[in-house]
Image: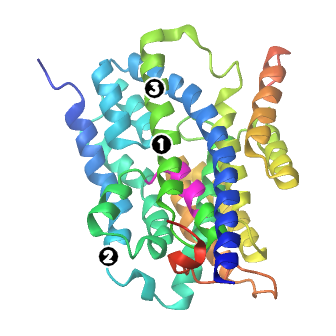
Amino acid sequence: MDGAITDSAGDGVRESRRRLVGDALAIAAYALPVGLVYGLAALQAHFTLLDVVVSCVVVLAGGAQFAAAGMVKDGAPWLAIAGVTLLVNARHLLYSAAIAPYTAERPRQERAFMAQFLTDETFALSLAHFRRIGRFDARGYWLGALVILVPWTLGSAIGYLAGGAVDARRLGLNVAFPAAMAGLSLGMVSGRRDVAAALGAVAVAVPVGLVGGASVGLVAGAVIGPFFGLAVPVSVNDRSGDRETPEPSAAAGLP
Amino acid sequence: MTLGLIPLAILMWGVTYPARALPMLAPGIERLPPQAVAYLRLAGPAALAALAAVNCLLTTDSPPNLALGVGPLAVGICVVIVWRTRLLLVGVGAAVVLVAVARAMGAG
C-alpha cells in the first residue's frame, strides 16, 4: 500500500519534471538569442568580453544588465546604475518570499547559494514545478537555474564576439522574452484570484510605466497586482488562496 | 591589467543579491499570516504578467510610449496557444515566427 502511494507520487514527480524539461527548452531556446542581443549591446557600450561574462554570471539579471549597458554607453554614474538595478530587481524579493516555504528545510548555505540563481525564469519554472509536486525538488530548481545561466552567458559571449552579425529584432527574437513570461504567468494560474492578480498587475504596470518608466511600472504592477487577486472571493476549486505548503519528502516520492 | 567594468558588476550584484536571498534566509517566513501568504502566492503570476506587459506594450524610449502592433498581438497568440496546449515552446515559437514574418513583409 505504502509502496503504491510512493510509486504514484514518484510518477507525479517524474511527470512534473518532464513538463519542466519541456518548458525549460523553451526558456533555453530564447535565452541564447536574447543573450546574443545583450552581447551586442555590451560591445557597443565598450565592455570587454570578461566584463560581459562576469556580468552574466555575477549579476544574472537580464533586464538590469540591458539597462546597465545602455547607461554605461551614455556615461551614467555607477551609483545611478546601481539605483536602477535595485529598482529593476526589487521583484526578486517577492520571488524569494514565494519560494521560501519550499526551501525552509534546506541547509542555510544551500539556500544562500540557490538565491544567487533566482531569476525570473528560474522562479517561474521551479515554483510551478514545486506547486505541481507539492514540495521542494533540488533537481527541478537547478534545472530551472541552468537553462537560463548557461545559454544566457553563452549567447552573450557569442553576441559580443560576433558583433552585429545577428539582427534579433528583424528575426522577431525580441518578442520571445515577453511571450515566455506571459506563458509562464499563465502556467501559474490556478483560479480566478490568480487571473485577477495578473490582469491587475498589467493594468497598473502599463500606465505607471508610461509615466515613470518601464522599471517603475514593473515594480508597481508586481506589488499592487496581488491586491486585485486578494479582493476576489475564493471559489470552491480555487487554489490561489492556498498556503505554499510542501509535503513531507517521502510522500512526494523523492530521493 | 584593469578591472574594467567588473567592479560595476559586483556593485550590481550587491544591490540584487539581498532581494534574492533575504526572504529565503529569514527565519519564520513559513509562519506568515494567511493574508500575507496569499499575497505572496499571487505575486508570482502578477510579477510575470507585469514583466510581460512592460516588455511588449511599452517602447524603449525615455519616457516610454505605448507599443501597439505585431508584438503585443504575438504575445497574445502565445498566451492562447499555451492556454490551449500547455506547450510554452510552441507558443513562444509561434510568437517569434509571427513577428519575423510580419517584419519581413514590412509590418511591425
* Image quarter of residue A220: bottom right
The chain ID associated with circle 2 is: B
Instruction: Between residue A126 and residue B68, name the one nearer to us.
Output: A126
- Labels 3 and 2 positioned on one and the same chain: no
The extreme bottom residue here reads B33
Which range is magenta?
Answer: A118-127
Task: Please rate how many residues cluster around mark 3, counting C-alpha atoms within 10 Å: few if below 14, some from 14 to 19, many from 20.
Answer: many
Tell me if residue A238 is in the magenta stretch. no
Q: Secondary structure at mark 1?
A: helix
Residue A177 pos. (x, y %): 63, 39
* Quadrant into which the N terminus of chain A falls: bottom right
Q: Which residue is mark 2?
A: B26
Residue A13 sits above or below residue B60 on the image:
below
- Labels 2 and 1 positioned on one and the same chain: no
Find the distance from the CA under tag 2 to the CA under tag 1.
Answer: 25 Å
Q: Earlier in the sequence, mark 3 or mark 1?
A: 1
Find the distance from the CA under tag 3 to the CA under tag 2.
Answer: 33 Å
Instruction: Between residue A164 and residue A29, name the one nearer to us.
Output: A29
Residue A80 pos. (x, y %): 30, 43
Q: Residue at x 58, y 83 (%)?
A: A243
Q: Which residue is mark 3?
A: A154
Q: Which residue is mark 1?
A: A146
The extreme left residue here reads B1
